[in-house]
Image (cartoon, rainbow, N blue to C red):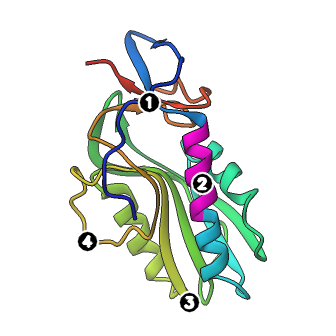
Amino acid sequence: MPTTPQTPCSSSAKPIQVKDLTFVPYVSESELLEAIDRIAQQINTEYQGKEVLFVGVLNGVFMFSSDLLKRIDLNCQINFVKLSSYDGTQSTEKVKQLFGLSESVEGKHVILIEDIVDTGITIEGLYNDLMKQNPASLEICTLLFKPDKYTKIVPIRYVAKSVANEFVVGYGLDYDGYGRNFPMIYQLQS
């Protein structure tokens, strides 16, 4: 798992305005896709011959889960849950489940897919809920990981990119619901 935070990308992309904030290029689309290729290959190798249930955490995971699943060559299913723990650019430290999983995970190999893991509050709550259902295995896969902010002990098995503790948007991540549509990651201009 990469532990070195990402440095700002040197692409020719320009800063963007999302509502009242300015964001600068951080992780390019090509860097994201290379990282996704790497973890998809790892998952394909480690789960060869097994069926996998991927559980994506909406809304932010929609782009990542789509690109990841295009690279998975296993027998698999995908389902989604919708959780929320942010208000603007700050974590509320409380997880609200807006809608949940529609099937049992008992006896299944499950991989939770997150857009970003920072404090770990959201993923820990979901992980603990799913473990109560006795899956055959349960791992976490995240696009972005903030190791300096992570406070939990739940292991994060698959990390596409480790990043600094900055607020980011793009590639599914948002600021008050906006900015998800950009094909790369931008960080809040300091």
Q: Which mark is residue 126?
A: none
* Residue toward you, 6 or 116: 6
Describe residue 37's horizontal placement relative to residue 17 as left or right: right
Numbered disc in front, either 4 or 1: 1
Position of residue 98 measured from the top left corner of the image (x, y, whole percent): 51, 49
Identify the residue under disc 2. Answer: 36
Q: Residue 136 carries which label?
A: 3
Identify the residue under disc 1. Answer: 9
Q: Which residue is drawn at 67% across and 62% down?
A: 79
Q: Which amino acid does label 4 sit on?
A: Ile
Examine the rendered structure and indicate whether residue 101 appears above or below residue 184. Answer: below
Q: Which is nearer the N-term, disc 4 or disc 2? A: 2
Q: Residue at x 25, y 56 (%)?
A: 150
C-alpha span from label 4 to label 1: 30 Å
**Callout 2 secondary element:** helix
Q: Which amino acid does label 1 sit on?
A: Cys
Q: Residue at x 44, y 30 (%)?
A: 9
Examine the rendered structure and indicate whether residue 141 appears above or below residue 23. Answer: below
C-alpha span from label 3 to label 2: 24 Å
C-alpha span from label 4 to label 2: 24 Å
Examine the rendered structure and indicate whether residue 13 appears above or below residue 79. Answer: above
Q: Residue 42, located in which quarter of the rendered image? A: bottom right
Describe residue 190's horizontal placement relative to residue 182 as left or right: left
Callout 4–callout 3 Cβ contact below 8 Å: no
Query: How many C-alpha atoms fall within 10 Å of the one at disc 3: few (<14), some, or many (≥20)?
Result: few
**Callout 3 secondary element:** loop
Q: Give the range drawn in magenta.
A: 30-39
Query: How many C-alpha atoms fall within 10 Å of the one at disc 4: few (<14), some, or many (≥20)?
Result: few
**Callout 4 secondary element:** loop
Numbered disc in front, either 1 or 2: 1
Position of residue 31 measured from the top left corner of the image (x, y, whole percent): 55, 42
Callout 1–callout 3 Cβ contact below 8 Å: no
